Structures are given as structure tokens and as C-alpha cells.
Image (cartoon, helix red, strand yellow):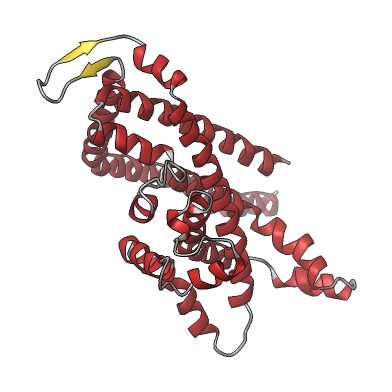
Amino acid sequence: MSPRKTTQVISLDSTLPVGGSNRESMRRPLLGRGLVRQSRIAGILFTLPATLVFLVVLTYPIFQNVRTTFYSVSLMTGQSKFIGFDNIVQILEDQELAKSVSHTIVWTVASLVGQIGLGLIAALLIDKPWRGMRFLRTLFLIPYVVPVIASALLWQWMLDGHYGIVTEPLHSLGLVSEGMSPLGQESTSLAAAILINIWRGFPFAMLVFWAAMQTIDQGQYEAASLDGAGPWRSFISITMPNLMPAVVALIALRGIWTLMYFELIWLTTQGGPMGSSQTVAVYLYKVTMGEFQLGYGAAIATVTGLSLLVMIGVIMLFRRWWRNR
């Protein structure tokens, strides 16, 4: 009898520390959750003032712009008159705006294709461990870091109709009339502006692609080479699928940026000649600051903003579909 009692006492005593440690381990997650919740609340409180200021600064101009859409505003008298949807109806009947919209679509799509395509080629090039790659990377970044006004002046000089170093071969090929600049000819002004925009914007795409390439597992390429896959097959089956999130991000970021890009076109062509390179952003500037039609300009800005929201929604849906594919 006594040995059994002794065994029972020992076994009971041995379970006590174990039970205590289980209670401690159950308390630790609760304490951790409490600290995480407190840190989140503290973070929200710290960022709340800046968030409120940002919302006020962002929301008030948007509200004022939407409100001005339904008014006819006179800068001379400072008076405004409610006209309802007349500005919206004028948008539907404005042929010059329709022409600007078509130019904007061509400008945006061509710039995106050129920047993403050239950026991908440049990223593949600088990713190779060749000699002089550091210098080449720096050289490729120059167009992006040069101020836009300096870029515009540089290209205006190179595309001058009389002494431009780029225009002379175009004259010889008959692509540009003698003594004319590609920026001053109706048939080539938009194309010239697009090429300048591609030159200036491709380094950003290059950096995005190059950063994405660093995250690709090199073991995939080794396995593909063992299976007999060549460089082109590896690029199609490994590189491009891993770069698709970067492509979608570039389409979203650069697409919105290019769609409303104003400075480069205004500095190079001002939308001319005869509106041949006029985009919505340039037309909006002319209507608002040139003709002082604030109500009509606000209506154009409102419709353009709604179109951008729709485009962002489509891109987000496509991105979600791509992830769940």
C-alpha cells in the first residue's frame, strides 16, 4: 500500500509545474494581443491629425470642383449662376474635346507600351554581370532625373527644323518637311511628343522590373536549364510570369500619371499645331486659364476624374483576377 501512495504523491507533484507552465503559455498570447491592439490604437492616434488635414485639403477642392460643375462662373464680376447640367451637355457636344480625348488615348497607350517595353529591355540588359554595367545603369537613369523643363528644351534644340541633329536625318528620309521640326508639323507632333515621353519615363519602368527580377528564385532557371529550356523559353515561362505583378503596377501608376501629364506636351508643342497634339490636360488648361470658363473646366475635370476612378476599378479587378487565376 505505501509504495502506491508514494508513487501517487510523486506523480501529482510532478504535474503541478506542468500545469503552471500551461497557464503561463496561455497568458502570453493574451498579453501579446493586448500589446498589439494598444500599438495599433497608438499608431492611429498619432496619424489621425495628419490624416484629417490631408482629407480636408483633398476633399474641399474636389467638393468645390464638383459644385462648380453646375455653375457658370465669371472671373470679372466674381458671380456664379446655377445652370444645372448645361456644362455636361456642352461636353457631349464639344468636338474639340472629343479630338483631345482621342489624342489622349493614343498618347497614353503608346507611351505605356514604349516605356514598359523599353524599360523591360533595359532591365534585362543591366541585370547581366557584364563589365561596365554600373556605368550603363547610371546612363539609363539620366532621362528620369533631368528636370522636365530641361528635357523639353534639350529636345526642342535637337528637333529644331534648321540645325537639329535629330531632324536632319528625318529631312533626308522625307519624314519631315524641309525646314520644319517634328514638333511643329501636324502629322508628327504627337508622335514626337510620345517619343520624348518614352525616353523620359522608361528608366522608372526599368527600376521596377530590375527590382522584381531580384526576387525571382534562381533555382527555377537552373531547373529549366536542366530540362533543356533555352533563354527564350526561360524568359517566357519564368521571367514574365514573375514580372506580371510589376507590369500591372506600372500600368496603374504610369497610366494615371501619363493620362493627365501636362508639362511635357505644353513645354514642347503647347498642344499644336492646330491641336494635333492637344490632350485633355492641355485642353483643360486652355479652357480654364486661357478662356476663363471655370464652370466648363470644372465639368471636364469632374468627368475626367470619374473616368479615372472607373479605370482604377477595372485595373483592381484585373489584378484580383490575376492573383486568383
Q: Nearer the viewer, residue 215 or 128?
A: 128
As drawn, 214 above or below 22: below
Q: Quadrant of residue 40?
A: top left
Residue 18 in sight in this render: no
Q: Nearer the viewer, residue 37 or 111?
A: 111
Residue 114 relative to residue 263: left or right:
right
The residue that appears at 39% across and 45% down in the rendered structure is 271
Q: Quadrant of residue 320?
A: top right
Task: List the single residue furthest toward the bottom.
Answer: 131
Task: List the single residue furthest toward the right.
Answer: 228
Q: Residue 31: x, y in percent?
A: 40, 45
Residue 244 relative to residue 97: left or right:
right
Q: Residue 262: x, y in percent?
A: 37, 47
Q: Residue 211: x, y in percent?
A: 55, 66
Q: Which image quadrant: the C terminus?
A: top right
Residue 207 in sight in this render: yes
As drawn, 95 above or below 226: above
Q: Nearer the viewer, residue 204 or 289?
A: 289
Residue 292 relative to residue 197: left or right:
left
The residue that appears at 42% across and 70% down in the rendered structure is 158
Q: Nearer the viewer, residue 68 or 159?
A: 159
Q: Residue 268: x, y in percent?
A: 37, 56
The residue that appears at 68% across and 43% down in the rendered structure is 322
Task: List the single residue furthest toward the front.
Answer: 178
The residue that appears at 33% across and 55% down in the rendered structure is 267
As drawn, 244 above or below 220: above
How many marks can you see? 0
